[in-house]
Image (cartoon, grey):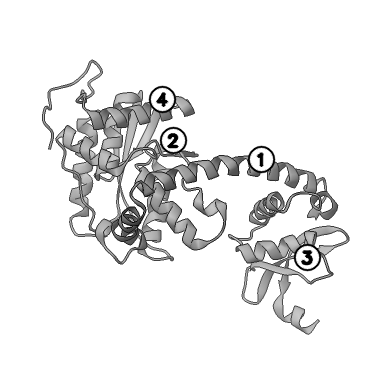
Amino acid sequence: MERDPAARGARGRRLLPETPAIHEIRLAVRAWLGRHGARSVAVALSGGADSAALTAAAVAEADSVRAVVVDHGLQAGSDVVAARAAEFARAHGCGSVHVVSVEVTGSGGLEAAARAVRYRALGDTRDGLPVLLGHTLDDQAETVLLGLARGSGPRSIRGMADFDDPWGRPLLGVRRSVTRAACGELGYEPYEDAHNSDPRFTRVRLRTEVLPLLDDVLGGGVAPALARTAAQLREDGEVLDAAADQALAAARGDGAGLDVASLEPVHPAVRRRALRRWLADEGASAPTDRTLRAVDDLIGRWRGQGPVAVGRGPRPGIRLVVSRRRGRLDVVFVDQQRCADD
């Protein structure tokens, strides 16, 4: 699996080859650690190229690394794959290695269910450390395209953050081809998950069909362009989010609900961000753009309209609604049948 088991530094860590791909990944990890003041980290290790290259670089750059290997049990021999990944982590000097076996259950399809279970396992095992994930520039480009398809505005196409506590992504500026090259430089053959080439998954088709076609039609460079767009939108979004937080704090005041007069002069783009955050705090789950604009109309286009449904209640027939009364917006649970009778 590896070329030189004896090549170790003073702290017992494997000395990495001074080769181009490994150097690029080490610089990316070093920069991330510096930006976020992290010296000890956990790494989500699957045994694939991205996470393996990240793990090796993290051991070289951080003071200590805890490797967490999640065995989803979705394929025969998954325990063997997990054991091999754990051995890679030990061989490269991870301070501790944890293999967590999980059962993939839940709604939203296999991919979403596996992701949810994986993140819970990582969260339970990280011991307070930030968790580094092997998402690359190519993953970021795919995420932006998926966001475009949802059509829910800049928030959905600004991609993944390089740090969304506790999840760190040092490799968002590194191509997937570089992580594969780094594994070659390490003499390590990465695990190839069959799900990553299964066309039943939308992300796989984006990777294998859509992005290559866009590169062909547009003359190349599509993935880096999408990643740059995501970074620019994220910077813009942070400014708008800060303004929305200020507007929301002012509108809340000391009472329940939101003061309409405080929100009326606020630009709609900022106001809708404030409303989205308020609705999330009140228990509304991911309001659509149409719903959000209907709530905003209770402020910016007030004509005496009725309540706006924003979520389900604790039992059938009950809905969470936003209504405007006496110059304030309030969120309440209502009985649909009673509303119909009234």
Of the image marks 1 and 4, the number of the one nearer the N terminus: 4
- SS of the residue at dot 1? helix
- Residue under numbered circle 3: 323
**Of the image marks 2 and 3, the number of the one nearer the N terminus:** 2
Q: Earlier in the sequence, mark 4 or mark 3?
A: 4
Q: CA distance from mark 1 to mark 4?
A: 28 Å
The N terminus - image quarter: top left
Which mark is first along the chain, 1 or 2?
2
Q: Is residue 207 left or right of residue 332?
A: left
Rounded to the nearest whole Å, what is the CA distance between mark 4 and mark 2?
Answer: 10 Å
Is residue 218 shown left or right of residue 321? left
Most foreground residue, 114 or 125: 114
- Which residue: 49% across, 41% down? 231
- Residue 165, position as x, y percentages in the image: 50, 39
Q: Amino acid at mark 2?
A: Pro
Residue that numbered label 1 is attached to = 242
Say which mark, if any, is on residue 195: none
Discs 2/3, front:
3
Residue indicated by mark 4: 39
Q: Amino acid at mark 3?
A: Ser
Q: Write down the residue under mark 2.
A: 130
Rounded to the nearest angstrom, the CA distance separating label 2 from label 3 is: 41 Å
Quadrant containing the C terminus in the rendered view? bottom right
Looking at the picture, which amino acid does disc 1 mark?
Ala
Distance from disc 4 to disc 3, alpha carbons, whole Å, reads 49 Å
C-alpha gap between disc 1 and disc 3? 26 Å
Which secondary structure lies at badge 2?
Answer: loop
Residue 92 in view (yes/no): yes
Residue at horizontal 81%, vertical 45%?
Answer: 253
